[in-house]
Amino acid sequence: MKQSQKNKIDWSQFLSGVPAEDYVFQNIPYDEQVKQASALIREAEIILIGAGAGVSTAAGLTYSGERFIDNFSEFIEKYGSMYMTDMYAAGFYPFPTQEAKWGYWSKHSLINRFLPPALPLYKQLYEIVKEKDYFVLTTNVDHQFQNAGFQAERIFATQGDYGNIQCEKGCHPKIYDAEDLFYKMDQARSDCLVPSYMVPRCPVCGGNMTMHLRCDSYFVEDENWHEAAGRYHDFLKKIEKKNAVLLELGVGFNTPTIIRFPFEKMVRENKGLSLIRLNMNEAFVPESFGNRAIGIGGDMAKVISDLSNLSEV
Ligand SMILES: [Zn+2]
């Protein structure tokens, strides 16, 4: 293991269907890995992208440091830097009122969902796969795939979208577009609070609304969600019969059962599939996959840029 991995989880204690000792950081030079990955993508008829938080971080939507401090100084001051350490922690802050909750989330949503343009990493990724039969399974909720040109019908965002809200108790299977509301809240926000008259109420039960993000058992899976899930399962059936590449991007171990482990299972069970895993620190892959797996660590923005340069040749 690399020095930087020493303080991480002991993988020999970790059960995921692949024997822990099978995982390796590949000892192949970076340039060679990128060339191999590029060749796999070029030859593939079908590409299934699985994307986690690491892609958006690499693309520039970082949740901590300067980007957090620059945009949320008012919130850090009001609620305390002990709690407001980054946008991830801030999202879990127990805001005492609905006015405070929407004061924060309207800002968070604008900063991460509505204001950023399609970022270069996502645009390069789209250029790499756009001529292929592709599909995107993602836990990201920032809409970057759609912004970059990926077709909505080829995306399954399982965990929600920063642009939508739902009943806090999920009392009915519907979600609501909150773009206008968030822009209005942003204009009206004062001392980190939105005016009471702007606080949304559930049109069915009259209770509180919340962000459409999977964080408890009340997450609403509406008609569109189920249709996207259906398209994803149809796509998986195609993959079984064709020469396909699973391109896994920035998927860590918060929710490995959605993308990381199922992708490994598919590759293990189907010899026609290959896995390209791009991950800052956790690019280890099962050694038993042989040359059907490439794990490239480090800065994904560079890897995608290098892959996109190779794909233009
Ligand atoms: Zn309700």
Image (cartoon, rainbow, N blue to C red):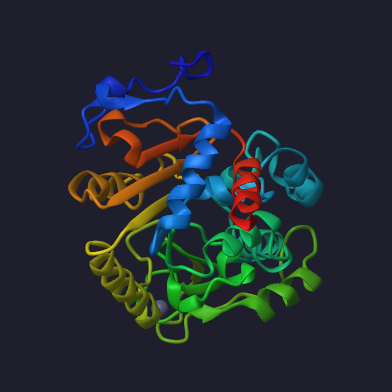
- Identify whether 131 is placed above or below 202: above
Q: Nearer the viewer, residue 201 or 119?
A: 119
- From the viewer's perspective, tell me whether residue 48 is left or right of residue 61: left
Residue 294 rendering spot, x and y as whole percentages = 42, 38
Give the camera-side residue of 167 and 227. Answer: 227
Task: Give the position of the C terminus as an image quadrant.
Answer: bottom right
Residue at 29% x, 44% y: name it. Answer: 264
Q: Image point 34% across, 20% down: which residue?
A: 10
Q: Looking at this view, is 209 or 197 the one in front? A: 209
- Give how far across and how far down residue 175 sits, in percent: 46, 79
Say which quarter of the image contains residue 225: bottom left
Image quarter hosting the N terminus: top left
Q: To which quarter of the image does residue 50 belong?
A: bottom left
Left or right of 82 on screen, residue 184: right
Residue 249 seen in render: no
Viewer-closest of 190 and 25: 25
| 205 over 111 or under it: above or below | below
Can you give x and y, in whole percent of width and height, for residue 74 in the image? 79, 50
How many numbered marks have been drawn onto this rendered protein structure? 0
State the residue at coordinates (42%, 26%): 26
* Quadrant of picture, ligand 1: bottom left
Q: Residue furthest toward the bottom?
A: 203
Quick check: 216 above or below 224?
A: above
Query: Can residue 295 be seen here?
Result: yes
